[in-house]
Amino acid sequence: MPAEFYLSLYWWILLLSAFAAASVPALLKQFRPLLLLPSAIIWIAATVAMNSMYTPAAALTGGGLSLLWGLFLLLLSLFFSGLREMTKKRYRGL
């Protein structure tokens, strides 16, 4: 029997808000705690709402997926910023 929270529209809305909150650090150029604090609060609120409205399994699923997405975006942005830096250093002397 599949988990019932997958069928709920509100769980998907909470999941998307958790995904958006986890994506914010990848979009920032500098990690300032004041800028990361609202993102962390939104992510925690979405995860707690999943836990209180549904089950802890729903919160673990939504929180885990959104954290993996945020980590993937962060690594992707670090990779591309590193490529940009390498090209700037390579062609600086020409």
Image (tube, rainbow, N blue to C red):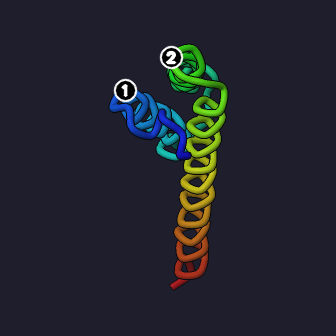
Q: Position of residue 26 (x, y in %)?
A: 53, 46
Task: Answer few, some or many: residues within 10 Å of disc 2's Cα (few below 14, many 20 plus, some between 14 and 19).
Answer: some
Q: Which disc is residue 10 wearing?
A: 1
Specify the label residue 53 is tagged with. 2
Left or right, 11 with reference to 1: left
Q: Residue at x 56, y 37 (%)?
A: 62
- Amino acid type at circle 2 is Met
Question: Residue at horizontal 61%, vertical 40%?
Answer: 61
Residue 68 point in image, percent of width and height:
62, 49
Horizontal side of 76 relative to 10 (left or right) equals: right
The answer to whether marks 2 and 1 mark residues whose Cβ atoms lie closer than 8 Å is yes
Q: Secondary structure at mark 2?
A: helix
Q: Residue furthest front?
A: 1
Earlier in the chain: of badge 2 and badge 1, it is: 1
Give 28 or 10, whichever is nearer the viewer: 10
Q: Is residue 90 above or below residue 41?
A: below
Image coordinates of residue 58 in percent, x first then y, are: 58, 32
Q: Secondary structure at mark 1?
A: helix
